[in-house]
């Protein structure tokens, strides 16, 4: 049976990328690798829409989150973070692990932080060095308007704007330089259509200046060392060579499509998935949908676990379960990265078959038809 992955990380990897990674290994300290890495570095700037260097780390996205903290702050510094899910919560955990004063702005799961909340938090803590945001909260499928929030941060404080873009880069509009952001990170296994193992981080000039004052301990994640190596298209430590080769091909695909078209494709697929769910009478979770994934309440009328097991074991479709208090209550459908119209209509064929198998009542073809109708819109 063909397995179909609809999880928001890891996401499907294009065949051409897998073939590239299957090629014989090369050495990372020779001109052949440096030529490839130079091309990768320029393509990453294009995806991030920045003229700043984009540092490639051999780690998961959480490694890049930690790199942001240890390179920009000193013990006792105050930061404000938005906790609206597992990954917003993670900003607070990492900050406290390094003895920062981490001020939480908590928003209910399924809702997005509003600019007024950030403005109020900054009034309460005017000396805060940064606001830590999550652009697309993977645990809930909620999008936060970081452009609007960044405008508030810049107009009312000297704080840096630091963004977890792990499931937003490549799915949502992201204009790092134009919007005046200070730090953004992402991971390879999301919108970049790669296996896990690489993380990426870029800093503004202002953030680089602040990093020179940082007193927190750092070694492997020392971005100053990584930036120096990048000047010669090299890495400070042994990179995940095979992943970098695949990334070269994946980034070529994104450039060929055009980043604005990539964003538009994700928005279109989001609309189709949401329409398909609503066509089946499934209730959507969250009030500010991400273009990376859609969170859906499991139908109350049937055994939700049995439905997801049937979807996976009988029809080969793997989605993501809910987390923490929403485990067993919602499931999450990814449309992040290497997906097209046929993937979405095929998904709803399988969803309908699985729902029918567990006794859920719906009009046959309602989900497929609703998704298809949305995809046919101009």
Image (cartoon, rainbow, N blue to C red):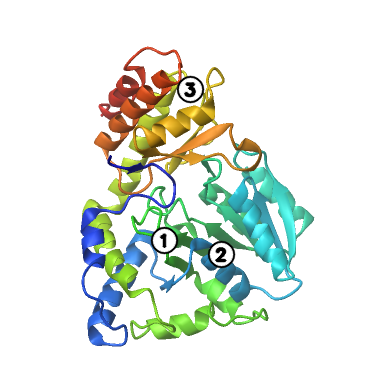
Q: Disc 1 and disc 3: Cα gap in Å?
A: 31 Å
Q: Nearer the viewer, residue 319 or 284?
A: 319
Q: Which residue is mark 3?
A: 282
The image quadrant where one finds the C terminus is: top left
Q: Disc 2 and disc 3: Cα gap in Å?
A: 34 Å
Circles 1, 3 touching at the beta carbon (< 8 Å)? no
Residue drawn where x is 39% and y is 48% of the image: 171
Q: Is residue 286 visible?
A: no
Crowd band around label 1 with a 10 angstrom C-alpha radius: few (<14), some (14–19), many (20+): some
Q: Disc 2 and disc 1: Cα gap in Å?
A: 15 Å
Dot 1 or dot 3: first in sequence order is 1
Q: Which residue is mark 2?
A: 65
Circles 2, 3 touching at the beta carbon (< 8 Å)? no
Residue drawn where x is 62% and y is 58% of the image: 132
Circles 2, 1 touching at the beta carbon (< 8 Å)? no
Q: Which residue is mark 1?
A: 196
Q: Position of residue 271 (x, y in %)?
A: 38, 31
* Number of marks: 3
The image quadrant where one finds the N terminus is: top left
The image quadrant that residue 245 belongs to is: bottom left
């Amino acid at each position: 049976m063909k397995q179909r992955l609809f999880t928001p990380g890891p996401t499907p990897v294009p065949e051409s990328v897998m073939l590239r990674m299957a090629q014989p290994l090369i050495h990372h300290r020779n001109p052949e690798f440096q030529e490839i890495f130079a091309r990768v570095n320029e393509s990453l700037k294009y995806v991030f829409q920045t003229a700043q260097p984009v540092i490639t780390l051999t780690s998961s996205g959480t490694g890049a989150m930690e790199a942001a903290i240890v390179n920009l702050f000193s013990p006792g510094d105050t930061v404000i973070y938005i906790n609206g899910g597992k990954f917003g919560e993670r900003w607070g955990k990492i900050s406290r692990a390094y003895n920062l004063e981490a001020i939480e702005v908590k928003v209910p799961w399924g809702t997005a932080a509003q600019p007024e909340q950030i403005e109020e938090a900054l009034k309460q803590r005017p000396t805060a060095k940064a606001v830590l945001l999550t652009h697309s909260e993977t645990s809930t499928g909620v999008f936060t308007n970081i452009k609007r929030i960044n405008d508030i941060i810049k107009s009312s404080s000297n704080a840096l704007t630091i963004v977890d873009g792990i499931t937003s880069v490549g799915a949502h509009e992201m204009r790092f330089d134009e919007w005046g952001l200070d730090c953004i990170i992402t991971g390879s296994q999301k919108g970049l259509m790669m296996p896990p193992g690489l993380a990426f981080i870029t800093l503004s000039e202002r953030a680089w200046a602040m990093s020179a004052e940082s007193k927190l301990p750092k070694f492997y994640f020392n971005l100053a060392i990584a930036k120096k190596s990048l000047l010669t298209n090299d890495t400070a430590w042994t990179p995940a060579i095979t992943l970098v080769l695949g990334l070269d091909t994946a980034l070529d695909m994104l450039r060929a499509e055009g980043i604005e078209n990539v964003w538009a494709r994700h928005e279109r697929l989001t609309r189709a998935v949401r329409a398909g769910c609503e066509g089946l009478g499934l209730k959507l979770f969250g009030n500010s949908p991400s273009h990376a994934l859609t969170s859906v309440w499991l139908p109350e009328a049937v055994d939700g676990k049995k439905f997801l097991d049937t979807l996976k074991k009988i029809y080969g479709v793997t989605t993501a379960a809910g987390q923490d208090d929403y485990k067993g209550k919602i499931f999450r459908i990814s449309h992040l990265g290497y997906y097209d119209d046929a993937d979405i209509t095929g998904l709803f064929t399988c969803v309908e078959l699985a729902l029918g198998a567990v006794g859920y009542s719906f009009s046959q073809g309602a989900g497929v038809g609703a998704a298809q109708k949305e995809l046919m819109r101009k």
